Amino acid sequence: MAKSALQVARAKYEPKVPKTLKGIVEIQEGKPTESVSDQAAIKALFPNTYGMPIIRFAEGSKRVDYAPINVGVILSGGQAPGGHNVIAGLFDGIKDMHPDSRLYGFILGPGGLIDHKYKELTADIIDEYRNTGGFDIIGSGRTKLETKEQFDKGLEILKKLNIKALVIIGGDDSNTNACVLAEYYAQIGAGVQVIGCPKTIDGDLKNEMIETSFGFDTACKVYSEVIGNIQRDCNSAQKYWHFIKLMGRSASHIALECALQVQPNICIISEEVEAKNQSLNDIIQYIADIVARRAEDGNNFGTVLIPEGLIEFVPAMKSLISELNEFLAHHDAEFKMIRKSEQRTYIISKLSKTNSELYASLPETVARQLTLDRDPHGNVQVSLIETEKLLAEMVGNRLAEMKTAGTFVGKFASQVHFFGYEGRCAAPSNYDADYCYSLGYTAAGLIGSGKTGYMSSVRNTTAPAAEWIAGGVPITMMMNMERRHGELKPVIQKALVKLDGAPFKAFAAQRDQWAVNTEYVYPGPIQYFGPTEVCDQATKTLQIEQKQ
């Protein structure tokens, strides 16, 4: 296979790790833990894995002799940069425990476990994928591990391959599934440990023990480079407003991090929109007012960052989508029989008055996107809604009204962009390469110490890697009860942007200045070689949170 010069050079990179991981390690256990909320309900559902202590690895005095162990690994959900290094760290970790240990990868996600599709990951395969982006070593998938039938089917192949531990690399849903699986296998005495690793570029799997999910650093650096390039073009041509949608359905961490890196004129934060009960009209007016203010200074250009899930955070839009979901669930066949040219009128006639008026006010393209096929759970597919086009078109209409009223004197032309897949499989930054390798090696340590129902945890990551703190956190500690599809279920609590948190406050303190002035920052591409302050820095979010 042909390789680029960068691929060849990156293959030689040796990830930096906490000094407590390589060498003689001992386990330190903290106090018993409890879930973030709904303690009684979570404890009742997870009697075998609830209340376990937080684990911390420390330098030891005596090397432990380990028997060989067979381990399985699954990549679950959307891709995130660094997944290959988690697997490499896991491989090196179990081989360090005993050279006869073996690693098996299940193909295309959790479905591979159920369907018994796997391959052994040997040293020559692992070496091909060190420090590379993507999940193509074994592929990923979105099959949910939820039923006893699935668990039992998976156990058949685990027993056949003599696999004693399974590592699930995924986001909050995947790690919730890992927790349920760990509990079931503990309950029936299956003799299989289950360990999770925190993955998602969205950044919404984080808490006091999980500083960041892997891939977030790299993805934000990729997006920030391209936004910086657009801002340079924007400031050069001085004739376009660029509306840029960024991945992040449930939380605005990516938009906030990119804003802190590039200093755009406008960045909308979904959580703030919801907290302030803002309407779509409020957002449109906010953007239009900034466009008009910049036009007074002769600046008919700018950048607007928009989180992917914004539409669902606008309370009025949330209500509209909810009613649409409910209506189409019961009248989908009837709706599909109607001519496309008449579908909009049909929907308007069937909705409640408030939602009907809002739906009628939307541009034709967006109105149609709201009625497209639902996801497997019956929900509108938010990523298919072109929020960037919606805002650009509606801001243009508002500015035309303001021009007639004499409150806008400039010109307005827009360009739209959506950055999502571009960041998910990038070659991991040094931070993610190091962090992911450490997560994998830590998972091996948790397996060696006989733990199950834990998530691999590496903290203090704004310090040099040697000083990082490795260990494990019980997954039950992160859980709460949430209503999903009409019933209460235990799930890992999603971490949204905290409006009283230091990163948002840092952004809010500067955004009015960025809005009027042109204070763009151009981060440039990810640097893999050179001064540590250029190559190894963590995200702005982490630096601000840890007051670096």
Image: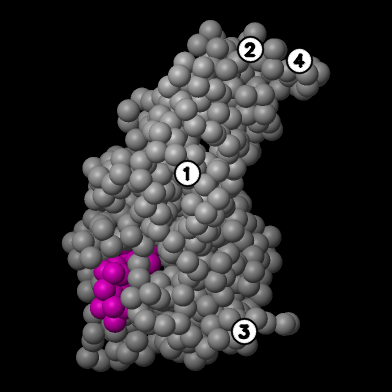
Quadrant occupied by the C terminus = bottom left
Q: Tell me what residue is drawn at x 67 percent, y 29 percent.
A: 365
- Which residue is most to the left? 31
Q: CA distance from mark 2 to mark 4?
A: 10 Å
| Element marked by disc 2 | helix
Image-quadrant location for residue 207: bottom left
Q: Residues within 10 Å of mark 4 (few under 14, many from 20)?
A: few
Q: Is residue 334 above or below residue 451?
A: above
Image spot of residue 435 (x, y percent): 40, 72
According to the image, label 3 marks what residue? 5
Q: Earlier in the sequence, mark 3 or mark 1?
A: 3
Q: Earlier in the sequence, mark 3 or mark 4?
A: 3
Q: Nearer the viewer, residue 201 or 266?
A: 266
| Element marked by disc 1 | strand
**Are the residues flagged by discs 3 and 4 in contact, CB closer than 8 Å?**
no
Determine whether, in the image, residue 521 is placed left or right of residue 239. Answer: left
- Looking at the rendered image, the disc whose residue lies closer to the viewer, 3 or 2, is 3
Q: Earlier in the sequence, mark 1 or mark 4?
A: 1
According to the image, label 1 marks what residue? 302
Under mark 3, the amino acid is Ala
| Element marked by disc 3 | helix
Image spot of residue 127 (x, y percent): 58, 85
